[in-house]
């Protein structure tokens, strides 16, 4: 009965520790995921600050300065949120470790008590003469054999108990060390979060000061936003017209109605389009170094909620003279050179098109075959704001797509 209880106790404890290990591993994986995300956000802020000019004093750049602060504040809030999640997860891990340590200590105490009892019992019957007398007093050979086995098993059990005490002691020491490290990590995260909150408060105060300056002449800045949006819309409409004409031409060539809303693809184009589709979420960035400043879709202006900002793609802030890369193999369908000098390259990938807008230099010409990551031009740096921003758009059958769904880790 005692042996059965000991066996059940060991089974329950083993199951408990296995559960704790599995739970701990899942939490560690989550902690690693959060830490990677935190490092990404820290890198994003650092990269953004290195890309954006810090010396803007001209009134014309007030909007850009406000956009910069809005961007950094958004990233900073995400950073604070992720760091809070890390700290909370560490708190749970610390509590779990403390519970595990408590269980291990109890188990170690029990093992030591059992071991001490065995040592006392062994001491009382330690003489070889006692063992011999124990064997000789057997009534028959079978009983003598069983007693010999018992002596051997008892000695083995003593040895096993001693080894288990060593193992549990080492486990306890490792957990204590891990617990200390977790507490230090938590303190470091709390300190970093406090610094991030202080920086966020400073940026929010700067935002308030800028908004106060802008509101003194709100109509002027609202007008600037509208004019900028109109310029973008004009180029977007030209691109959409070019794609519609290409779609109509493909259908006429295939003997179909030019009113069709999809491309009539050749076998080669169909294969290329299928390959483009298969790489959804894995396409490279159109620039090697960059951050998305304006995402896809309709958004509110940072200074006037009544003024919508319509983004058919993404606007990527990058370094001065940054090279632009084709995100996939294809053919240069069109090159647009507007009067304002913000050049556009349109590349066709079957029924898909990618548009690269706001270029200062163009390295390719219409009809060229391009490969993935091939350099096709350079991003223009705006003289007024000193910003270098690439506008990137993806189309499927003439309809815009969210680039974040297509570009790796956007």
Image (cartoon, grey):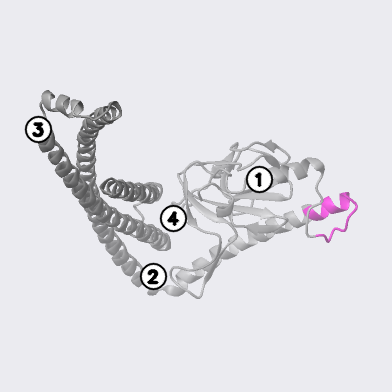
Secondary-structure class at tag 2: helix
Q: CA distance from mark 3 to mark 4?
A: 89 Å
Q: What is the tally of numbered marks visible in this picture?
A: 4
Outermost residue to the front: 139
Q: Nearer the viewer, residue 84 or 98?
A: 98
Q: Which mark is residue 214?
A: 2
Quadrant for residue 262, please give it: bottom right
Q: Which mark is residue 385?
A: 4
Which numbered disc, 2 or 1, marks the residue closer to the eye? 1
Q: Is residue 236 left or right of residue 101?
A: right
In percent of width and height, residue 308 lies at 53, 70
Q: Tell me which label, 3 or 2, sits earlier in the chain.
A: 3
Q: Residue at x 21, y 43 (%)?
A: 172
| Mark 2 vs 4: CB contact within 8 A | no
Q: Is residue 266 left or right of residue 55?
A: right
Q: Tell me which label, 2 or 4, sits earlier in the chain.
A: 2
Outermost residue to the right: 255
Which contiguous range is marked in magenta?
247-260
User: What residue is shown with label 3?
Assistant: 123
Quadrant for residue 128, please give it: top left
């Amino acid at each position: 009965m005692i042996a059965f209880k000991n066996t059940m106790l060991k089974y329950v404890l083993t199951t408990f520790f296995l559960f704790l290990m599995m739970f701990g591993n899942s939490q560690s994986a989550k902690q690693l995921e959060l830490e990677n995300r935190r490092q990404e956000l820290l890198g994003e802020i650092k990269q953004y600050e290195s890309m954006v000019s810090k010396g803007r004093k001209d009134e014309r750049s007030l909007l850009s300065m406000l956009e910069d602060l809005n961007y950094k504040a958004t990233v900073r809030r995400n950073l604070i949120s992720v760091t809070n999640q890390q700290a909370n997860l560490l708190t749970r891990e610390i509590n779990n470790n403390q519970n595990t340590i408590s269980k291990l200590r109890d188990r170690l105490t029990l093992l030591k008590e059992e071991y001490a009892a065995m040592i006392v019992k062994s001491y009382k019957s330690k003489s070889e003469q006692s063992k011999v007398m124990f064997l000789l007093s057997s009534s028959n050979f079978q009983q003598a054999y069983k007693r010999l086995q018992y002596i051997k098993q008892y000695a083995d059990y003593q040895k096993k108990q001693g080894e288990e005490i060593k193992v549990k002691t080492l486990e306890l020491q490792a957990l204590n060390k891990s617990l200390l490290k977790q507490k230090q990590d938590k303190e470091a995260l709390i300190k970093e979060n406090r610094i991030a909150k202080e920086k966020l408060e400073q940026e929010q105060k700067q935002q308030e000061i800028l908004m106060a300056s802008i509101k003194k002449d709100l109509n002027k800045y609202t007008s600037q936003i509208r004019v900028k949006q109109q310029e973008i819309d004009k180029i977007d409409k030209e691109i959409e017209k070019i794609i519609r004409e290409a779609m109509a031409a493909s259908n006429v060539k295939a003997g179909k109605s030019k009113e069709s809303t999809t491309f009539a693809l050749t076998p080669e184009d169909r294969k290329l389009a299928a390959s483009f589709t298969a790489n959804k979420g894995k396409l490279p960035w159109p620039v090697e170094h960059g951050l998305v400043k304006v995402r896809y879709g309709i958004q509110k202006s940072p200074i006037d909620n009544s003024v919508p900002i319509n983004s058919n793609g993404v606007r990527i802030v990058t370094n001065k003279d940054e090279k632009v890369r084709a995100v996939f193999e294809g053919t240069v369908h069109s090159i647009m050179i507007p009067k304002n000098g913000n050049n556009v390259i349109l590349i066709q990938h079957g029924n898909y098109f990618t548009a690269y807008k706001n270029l200062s230099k163009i390295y390719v010409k219409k009809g060229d075959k391009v490969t993935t990551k091939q350099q096709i031009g350079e991003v223009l740096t705006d003289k007024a704001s000193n910003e270098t921003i690439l506008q990137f758009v993806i189309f499927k059958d003439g309809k815009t797509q969210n680039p974040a769904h297509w570009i790796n880790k956007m």
